[in-house]
Amino acid sequence: MFISPLKSSRRVALSIAVSGALALGLATTAQAQVDTGKSAISAVSKQMNVPVNGTFKKFTASVDFDPAKPAAGKAQFSVDVASYDLGDESFNKEVRAKEWFDAATFPNATFVSTSIAAAGPGTYSVSGKLTIKGKSSNVVVPVTFKQDGANQIFDGVLPIKRLQFDIGQGEWKDTSVVADDVQLKFHIVAAAKK
Amino acid sequence: MTDFKSSAAGGRYTGTAIMLHWLIAVLIIGGFWLGWVMTDIPGLTPTKLRYYSWHKWIGVTVFALAWLRVLWRLSHPAPPLPAGMPALQRLVSNAVHGLLYVLMIAIPASGYLYSSAAGVQVVYLGILPLPTLIGPDQQLKVILRLTHICLNYALLGLFVLHLLGVVKHTLIDRDGLLARMIPFLR
């Protein structure tokens, strides 16, 4: 379970921890263990048309998915936005600031699925609530699924608009420098618990 | 007054060489100034990011034009230096010009590689994505940054020598050497 090192964020972290625990408690069936070492979540933005890739080094995720019964599936993610790594500490520090992620106030971005439907061979539409910087939005995430031995592998890209979540305020609202379109990419490897 | 048209050196650079010289000169001065200003902006601001992109686009342009200029120079020799010029002055003149050519290519190249090492692709004019020749590399990034800065100070030094040459030939020698590189004289 994620524990925020930031004092001011304790209450938020606690509430997320509680809701996370509830979600885990509800999913009493074969819960898959997400291997965060093999999984990756990244956000690709465009700065003056230059693709800028950053990865979230810390996140927790729980996935409960049976391809035979997709509708019964559940997925939940909690991403530590302060762990966003652009490969340069001065940039990382900037995006943690109030105008961007405001990581001190909103330490986690979350996604909680509400329904999963088959969308084609090996592809599924995962509907759910995406919350970033305290702003929630209902999204439908296209996900491809692959069974690799005992592992379940999920891949997908979710295009979002950063300004919808107040990511980049003040002078950063100017989308001619940093585009509004951001792609959230994920590669999730989950091992079924025995 | 110096009569620029009757250059003692005889002959002028070709129109293409003159155009490339001044075009590259303007781009280098603009790119150098942007580089100076942008690195002085604290933190991260949209203006800073914009300047960085413009700086890189200028660099890529200079790099391409510099190669064109080298090819042009190889196929169209420069007009000869004044006949009575001492050997040492010829050596200095050739060395400064040679090094300026080297830096016109080496400075954009070092900056480009620095950007690659920093994990930032160059998208020329925001339209054409150029290949990242090396992957993100923290150690190389530090080395390339220092290289880019040092080469630029070398360029600044050579630029001053270049200008001192102009001053010497115009005010002291009064040999009208500058006319070889002044556009629209003929």
Image (cartoon, coloured by chain):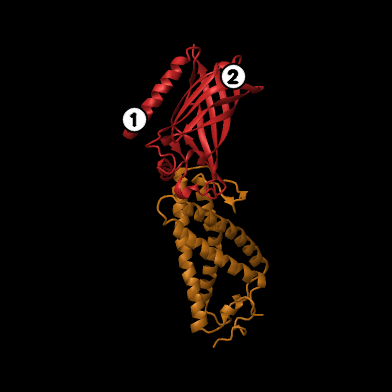
Chain colours: A red, B orange
**Residue A121: x percent and y percent?**
67, 22
Residue A6, by quadrant, is: top left
Which residue is rendered at x = 59% and y = 67% of the image? B23
Q: Chain of mark 1?
A: A
Q: Residue at x 48, y 35 (%)?
A: A55
Chain bearing tag 2 is A
The quadrant in which the N terminus of chain B is found is bottom right
Locate residue B107, reporting x and y percent: 52, 58
Q: Quadrant of residue B20?
A: bottom right
Which amino acid, mark 2? Gln
Front-lying residue, B82 or A120:
A120
- Residue A19 placement (x, y as % from top left): 42, 22
* Residue A138 visible (yes or no): yes
Determine the secondary structure under disc 2.
Answer: strand
| SS for dot 1 | helix
The residue identified by callout 2 is: A147
| Outermost residue, bottom side | B1
Residue B7 image point, x, y percent? 60, 83
Q: Is residue B102 left or right of residue B16?
A: left
Q: Is the residue B92 above or below the residue A128 in the image?
A: below
Q: Nearer the viewer, residue A135 or B97?
A: A135
Name the foreground residue: A111 vs B181. Answer: A111
Q: Residues within 10 Å of mark 2 (few under 14, many from 20)?
A: some
Quadrant (top left/top right/bottom left/bottom right) for the C terminus of chain B? bottom right
Residue type marked 1: Arg
Q: Is residue A1 visible?
A: no
Number of the label disc, if any, that sits on residue A10: 1
Q: Furthest residue to the left?
A: A7
Going from N to C along the chain, the mark reached first, 2 or 1, is 1
Q: Which of the labelled discs sits on residue A151, or is there none?
A: none
